[in-house]
Image: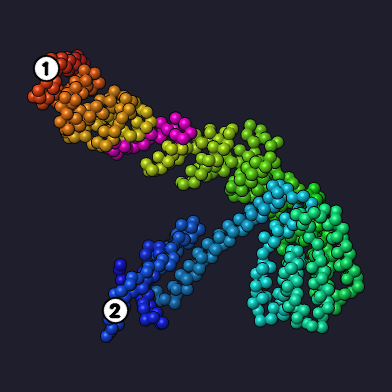
């Protein structure tokens, strides 16, 4: 191990900690430190701890930070020494900060988009997939609002961490926010702190606590019917109204305001615009205190009226508002259409539509060109994935599950994947082979074989041509192998040639290459009889190129010295045949010259 970058002595033990920075990691370890006049103990081993792994470099947004700051860094190094530091440092520092700010804004924009996507998806889950009935519907909507309006919890932490929570300036905002979200238990706990601060008004706080504790919530797991729940809720509502009419809370404006909220008073609810934040939060709160047994079919009426009341007449509704309103109207196709227009990719609509289709909610919607909506969106999403250097592999599964046009799209897209390396080519090839895409398999193998041959990598070229079952190309490469042998006297890529197996039958030239290599192997192992028989068969089969006949005859000469290995008569026949072939070849050449 190299020496630590620096050491820090531990106060209690006298030991030292060493720190070492690697390419992406920080290592912490104990070091053996020897002070003057002491003897360092060699017993025991030092443990190494990986403190942090720097994975930020893989973030696309932070990569932008690294690139931009690199330009600033280089510029700073080239600033002349004659320029005063006080003139250049603030400017460079602001440049760095501006890059940081730009990346933060980009991250915030991404987070905002994802939050909106989750908000829409969650609502679609409640309305379309869970299909919650009256009673349960409000409970689901309350969970939806609470999940996406979590700022009250941040305020609560701030209030509770103060010296006097009941006197904090956000105290009543927290209480009212809890009530608006139907979180009555949390509201009651917060009110206890105020009651303890004002013993004289404890009776009034006790009454409010009673009203909150008695507020009924529908329980779908109980035996209570929706009608019975509605009766109980109306009795509670009347009790709250009596307390307001009796001026039970007139001496405390905050408790009186909460009482009005419990009655669902519209003016009081609209006064809470800042706490509610959005019209759909206002909608759910209004349903909670006015229509707790709302039916799914009535949601669109309340949604439209709440949006109209909450939004300023001069303000323009956002695309998100239109999407949520379409959801409350149970217009699935409008939701999908609007999301397709607003969002910058097909991920959301493709996956949501697929899920809804599996829930049998999109069966009747077919498009004019033959495919249904689900398949159209999946095809678009998968086509986009195919443009990415690594995500294309994910797209394959999406195409597989598009029965109408998925196969056609996959065949077209797979041909456009750049084959930069053999590893990637093998991945693409595996996809094609698993799906019996024979044309694409041949095309990929031909491309890779041609590339390998161009780079004089004969073994790889032959392997690809065999995989493509391309007899003509295999013949060409086999001849290159034989030419190399004639030139150098040895074969390259012996592992491949020795293990051709049945593949050598792809072409006569490849068969000859494999068998001729086998002859050399048998000869080298001193199996002369087998080698002679094989050589004889090669000479009689006439599959050797004519340019190689003399080489075969030369190979046969040493075998004649062996006893009863090869018949002289057989060799003579082969020799005559070889000489006749060579004579015919030369005669043809002379004729061409004339």
Report which quarter residue 476 is drawn in.
top left
Residue drawn at (64%, 38%) of the image? 373
Q: Is residue 88 above or below residue 460?
A: below
Helix, strand or loop for disc 1? helix
Mark carried by residue 40: 2
Q: Residue at x 78, y 82 (%)?
A: 198
Residue 47 image position (x, y, % from top left): 37, 69
Of 10 and 279, the residue lying toward us:
10
Start-end of magenta stretch: 432-460
Name the residue at the front extreme.
223
Classify residue 112 by image quadrant: bottom right
Asked which quadrant contains residue 50, the reply is bottom left
Q: Residue at x 66, y 55 (%)?
A: 119
Name the side, left or right, on which 228 lies relative to 2: right
449 is within the stretch colored magenta? yes
Residue 36 in view here: yes
The mark nearer the N terminus, 2 or 1, is 2
Residue 530 located left or right of residue 166 = left
In this image, 201 relative to 19: left or right? right
Q: Position of residue 167 (x, y in %)?
A: 72, 80
Instruction: Give the main secondary structure of the magenta stretch.
Output: helix
Question: Which mark is nearer the camera, 2 or 1?
Answer: 2
């Amino acid at each position: 191990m190299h020496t630590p970058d620096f050491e820090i002595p531990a106060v209690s033990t006298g030991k030292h900690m060493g720190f070492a920075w690697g390419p992406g990691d920080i290592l912490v370890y104990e070091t053996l430190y020897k002070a003057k006049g002491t003897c360092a103990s060699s017993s025991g081993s030092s443990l190494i701890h990986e403190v942090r792994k720097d994975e930020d470099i893989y973030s696309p947004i932070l990569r932008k930070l690294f690139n931009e700051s690199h330009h600033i860094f280089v510029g700073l190094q080239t600033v002349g020494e004659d320029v005063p530091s006080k003139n250049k440092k603030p400017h460079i520092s602001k440049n760095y900060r501006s890059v940081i700010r730009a990346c933060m804004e980009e991250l915030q924009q991404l987070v905002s988009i994802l939050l909106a996507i989750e908000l829409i998806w969650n609502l679609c889950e409640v309305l379309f997939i869970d299909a919650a009935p009256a009673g349960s519907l409000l409970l689901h909507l309350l969970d939806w609002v609470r999940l996406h309006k979590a700022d009250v919890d941040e305020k609560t932490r701030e209030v509770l961490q103060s010296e006097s929570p009941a006197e904090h300036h956000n105290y009543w905002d927290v209480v009212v926010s809890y009530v608006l979200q139907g979180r009555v238990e949390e509201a009651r706990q917060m009110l206890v702190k105020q009651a303890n601060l004002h013993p004289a008004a404890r009776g009034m706080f006790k009454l409010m606590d009673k009203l909150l504790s008695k507020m009924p919530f529908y329980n779908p797991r109980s035996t209570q019917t929706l009608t019975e729940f509605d009766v109980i809720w109306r009795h509670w509502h009347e009790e709250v109204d009596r307390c307001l009419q009796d001026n039970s809370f007139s001496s405390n404006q905050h408790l009186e305001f909460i009482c009005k909220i419990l009655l669902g008073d519209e003016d009081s609810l609209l006064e809470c615009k800042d706490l509610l934040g959005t019209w759909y939060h206002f909608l759910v709160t209004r349903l909670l205190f006015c229509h707790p047994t709302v039916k799914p079919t009535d949601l669109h009426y309340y949604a439209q009226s709440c949006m109209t009341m909450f939004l300023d007449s001069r303000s323009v509704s956002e695309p998100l508002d239109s999407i949520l309103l379409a959801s409350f109207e149970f217009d699935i196709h409008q939701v999908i259409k609007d999301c397709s227009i607003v969002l910058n990719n097909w991920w959301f609509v493709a996956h949501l539509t697929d899920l809804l289709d599996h829930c049998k909610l999109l069966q009747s919607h077919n498009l004019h060109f033959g495919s249904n909506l689900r398949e159209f969106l999946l095809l678009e999403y998968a086509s986009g994935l195919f443009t990415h250097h690594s995500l294309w592999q994910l797209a394959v599964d999406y195409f597989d599950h598009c029965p109408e046009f998925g196969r056609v799209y996959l065949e077209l897209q797979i041909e456009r994947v750049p084959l930069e390396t053999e590893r990637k080519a093998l991945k693409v090839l595996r996809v094609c082979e698993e799906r019996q895409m024979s044309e694409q398999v041949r095309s990929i193998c031909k491309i890779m074989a041609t590339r390998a041959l161009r780079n004089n990598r004969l073994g790889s070229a032959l392997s690809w041509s065999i995989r493509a079952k391309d007899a003509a190309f295999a013949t060409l490469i086999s001849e290159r192998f034989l030419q190399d042998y004639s030139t150098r006297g040895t074969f390259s890529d012996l592992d491949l040639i020795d293990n051709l197996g049945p593949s050598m039958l792809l072409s006569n030239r490849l068969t000859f290459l494999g068998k001729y290599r086998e002859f050399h192997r048998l000869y080298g192992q001193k199996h002369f009889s087998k080698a002679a028989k094989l050589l004889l068969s090669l000479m009689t089969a006439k599959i050797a190129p004519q340019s190689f006949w003399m080489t075969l005859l030369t190979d046969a000469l040493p075998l004649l010295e062996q006893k009863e290995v090869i018949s002289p008569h057989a060799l003579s026949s082969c020799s005559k045949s070889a000489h006749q072939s060579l004579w015919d070849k030369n005669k043809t050449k002379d004729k061409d010259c004339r």
